[in-house]
Amino acid sequence: MMKKSAIVIGAGIVGLAVARALTIRGYAVTVIEKSSKSVGASIRNFGMVLPIAQPDGILFERAMNSRRIWKSLCVDAKIWHDEVGSLQLAYADDEWQVLSELAELYKHRGYTLLNSKQTCSTSYPIVSHMLQGSLLSKDEIIVDPREAISKIPEFLSERYSVKFIWNTTATSIIRDTVFAGTKSYSADEIFVCSGSDFETLFPEEFANQNITKCKLQMMRMAAQGENTRLGPMLCAGLSLINYNSFSVAPTHSKLKARLHVDFPEYIKWGIHVMVSQNQSGELTVGDSHEYGLTPDPWDKALVNDLILKYLNNFAQFKNEKIIETWNGVYSKMKSGETELVIRPEDAVTIVNGLGGAGMTLSFGLAEEIVS
Ligand SMILES: Cc1cc2nc3c(=O)[nH]c(=O)nc-3n(C[C@H](O)[C@H](O)[C@H](O)COP(=O)(O)OP(=O)(O)OC[C@H]3O[C@@H](n4cnc5c(N)ncnc54)[C@H](O)[C@@H]3O)c2cc1C
């Protein structure tokens, strides 16, 4: 029997997850990527697989399925990863109240409420002044996205003979054929995983969707030296109003109202602050959220200053030198949908719009789409 064939456009995490799901189901897979390596949102993020940010139900299950796939893939492809978990810190009564409610509501997830002394012993840079405590989750995994997004194609090629065609922009798709300038490639199924590039393929379909782009600013702090592993990814009050999974707490809306009054500049730029650590000991710090179909290309010093100021309230490091700044742009649905999966033509599926959760949800989503 002839193998069924598939073409995947885009070698970001969504395209790689779809390629993996297809190849393990026996498809002959070709991935077409416009750059010599993927340099989109998937290499610009924290590298956090964050189930805690997902509400109960299909999304949490999808995140945990992704986590399982990430773990085995990292082992198989020799990708550095660390099952660090995450620590949500509380410095005010209302933040602590929300964390206490979440610990109760998410009892089945096994989160632990830590007092301030226990919290400080979990991670060395945590600021103890005014600290009320924290919520510890053990589910989160960190990868270095720059390493992971370059090693997964190598692994898929070697293990499953997935073919990668780099430096090639898919310029149009007609029925079962992808055109790239004068070249053409045909397959039984085509998956368009083009991230925030809504302009090249199916622009009318994207224009008809409730989808936009979001630009985020990020920073990297220098390596911290020996014996300075951060442990869990750290975040504090503002993150409690960034993720849907936290909004189930009964007093969440009161906390949200207070943070809007106390931090108007942070709300304006969509800032919440997280810090994680890569395998070299460097710290990834971010982020902000600016929405619109044509994001400004420049980074705003004001936004980075606000992020660092907030970070300083909950974590202080030996070496706070900023060695890199960048921004990333992802696509996001505007009305709360968590992804866009549509079939504009019989053989074509668009998979897009995973917003700030692409590292967390892509592998699980791909399993659902391809099965
Ligand atoms: C700063 C930042 C922090 C984040 N932090 C996290 C996090 O900690 N955890 C988490 O779960 N998620 C996080 N995210 C979200 C996550 O990074 C995105 O959801 C995810 O990377 C989107 O993946 P993608 O494959 O859709 O897009 P991309 O990574 O942008 O990939 C799209 C690819 O398609 C290619 N392409 C586009 N058009 C064509 C064409 N016509 N022909 C050929 N190739 C084409 C592009 O070159 C690109 O390589 C973060 C995002 C950002 C920006």
Image (cartoon, rainbow, N blue to C red):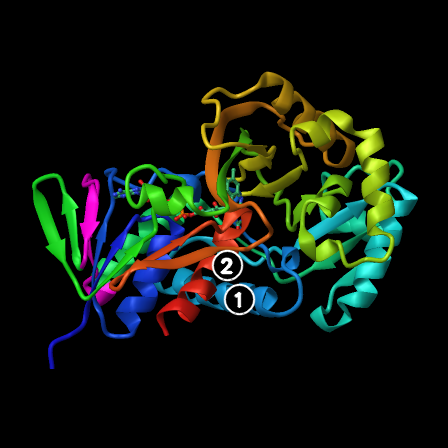
Dot 2 alpha-carbon crowd within 10 angstroms: few under 14, some 14 to 19, many 20 or more: many
Quadrant of the snapshot with the C terminus: bottom left
Q: Which mark is residue 62?
A: 1
Viewer-proximal residue among 128 and 7: 7
Determine whether, in the image, residue 314 is placed left or right of residue 328: right
Q: Quadrant of the N terminus?
A: bottom left
Q: In x, y percent, where is residue 115?
A: 87, 53
Q: Examine the rendered structure and indicate whether residue 179 appears above or below residue 313.
A: below
Residue 130 rendering spot, x and y as whole percentages: 89, 38
Q: Residue furthest top?
A: 301
Earlier-in-chain disc, 2 versus 1: 1
Please state which amino acid type lies under the numbered disc 2: Leu
Residue that numbered label 2 is attached to: 361
When the figure is inspected, residue 145 is found, relative to residue 161, above or below; the finding is above
Q: Which mark is residue 250?
A: none
The question of residue 165 being in magenta is answered with: yes
Q: Amino acid at mark 1?
A: Arg
Query: Residue 8 occupies which quadrant of the picture?
Result: bottom left
User: Vertically, is 300 above or below 50?
Assistant: above
* Residue 165 in sight in this render: no
State left or right for residue 194 relative to residue 131: left
* Residue situated furthest right in the rendering: 93
Q: Which residues are magenta?
A: 159-175
User: Depth check: 177 or 249 in front?
Assistant: 177
In what element is the residue under mark 1? helix
Q: Is residue 290 rendered magenta in the image?
A: no
Q: Residue at x 58, y 39 (%)?
A: 226
